[in-house]
Image (cartoon, helix red, strand yellow):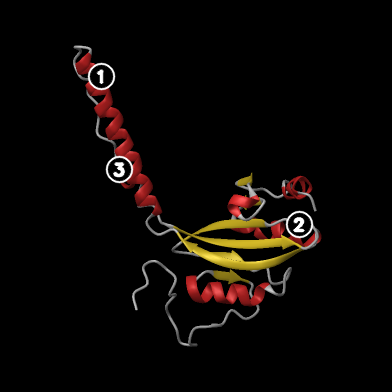
């Protein structure tokens, strides 16, 4: 399956982004970011084209939004300083620049960091690797199961649930796979404390 052909077929699925990547640098040909409700549709396209599932895992983006906010505030402060220095060098009065408003202050409630579910697929004949990603809010990490499309996804989803707490809605048996049955923790979350 050629990259252009699978890209065209995946274009029928509403996506946040689809990026062609350098396989030698990234390890995959296409990176598709979808909303959680589009996962089954995207996966069904790959299944129809003969792709197999390699892995499902999670990513904890805890702290990402705070880091982005700090970066934006630092950039705004640097720009204000540069404007003031340029005005002083030109003998003009420095412009009055308001301090940047923190993101949380501009919103009704603070931004919640996300978890991300990452699905890796490959194709035997052309070795075309495709990654599908979906972000979910940390406080309600739910995505639909793909085990009805790829039965082998069953244990990948159970493992991801064990380690990240992501719930795969509609999963036939979302019980602990590697953790004790009574485990109420998810050890790969960044805020996990043993």
- Callout 3 secondary element: loop
Distance in Å between CA atoms under marks 1 and 3: 25 Å
Evaluate if marks 2 and 1 touch, with contact meaning CB atoms under 8 Å apart. Answer: no
Question: Looking at the image, is mark 2 or mark 3 earlier in the sequence?
Answer: 2
Q: Could you say where residue 42 lies in the image, as x and y percent from the top left?
A: 70, 56
Left or right for 138, reference 14: left
Residue 109 seen in the figure? no
Question: Looking at the image, is mark 1 or mark 3 earlier in the sequence?
Answer: 1
Q: Could you say where residue 10 lies in the image, as x and y percent from the top left?
A: 73, 50
Q: Could you say where residue 172 lies in the image, as x and y percent from the top left?
A: 65, 78
- Callout 2 secondary element: helix
Q: At x 63% / y 57%, what residue is drawn?
A: 132
| Residue for badge 2 | 45
Distance in Å between CA atoms under marks 2 and 3: 42 Å
Q: Nearer the viewer, mark 1 or mark 3?
A: 1
- In the rendered image, which quarter is residue 96 located in? top left
| Residue for badge 1 | 86
Q: At x 35% / y 51%, what residue is drawn?
A: 66
């Amino acid at each position: 399956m050629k990259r252009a052909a699978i890209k065209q077929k995946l274009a029928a699925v509403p996506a946040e982004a689809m990026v062609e990547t350098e396989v030698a640098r990234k390890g995959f040909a296409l990176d598709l970011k979808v909303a959680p409700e589009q996962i089954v549709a995207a996966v069904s396209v790959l299944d129809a084209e003969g792709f197999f599932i390699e892995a499902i895992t999670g990513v904890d983006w805890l702290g990402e939004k705070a880091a982005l906010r700090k970066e934006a505030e630092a950039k705004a402060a640097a720009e204000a300083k540069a404007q003031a220095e340029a005005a002083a060098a030109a003998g003009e009065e420095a412009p009055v620049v308001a301090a940047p408003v923190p993101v949380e202050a501009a919103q009704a409630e603070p931004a919640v960091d996300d978890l991300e579910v990452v699905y890796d697929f490959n194709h035997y004949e052309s070795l075309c690797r495709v990654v599908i990603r979906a972000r979910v809010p940390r406080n309600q990490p739910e995505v639909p199961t793909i085990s009805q499309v790829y039965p082998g996804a069953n244990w990948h989803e159970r493992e991801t649930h064990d380690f990240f707490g992501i719930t795969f809605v509609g999963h036939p048996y979302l019980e602990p796979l590697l953790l004790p049955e009574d485990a109420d923790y998810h050890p790969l979350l960044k805020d996990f404390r043993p």
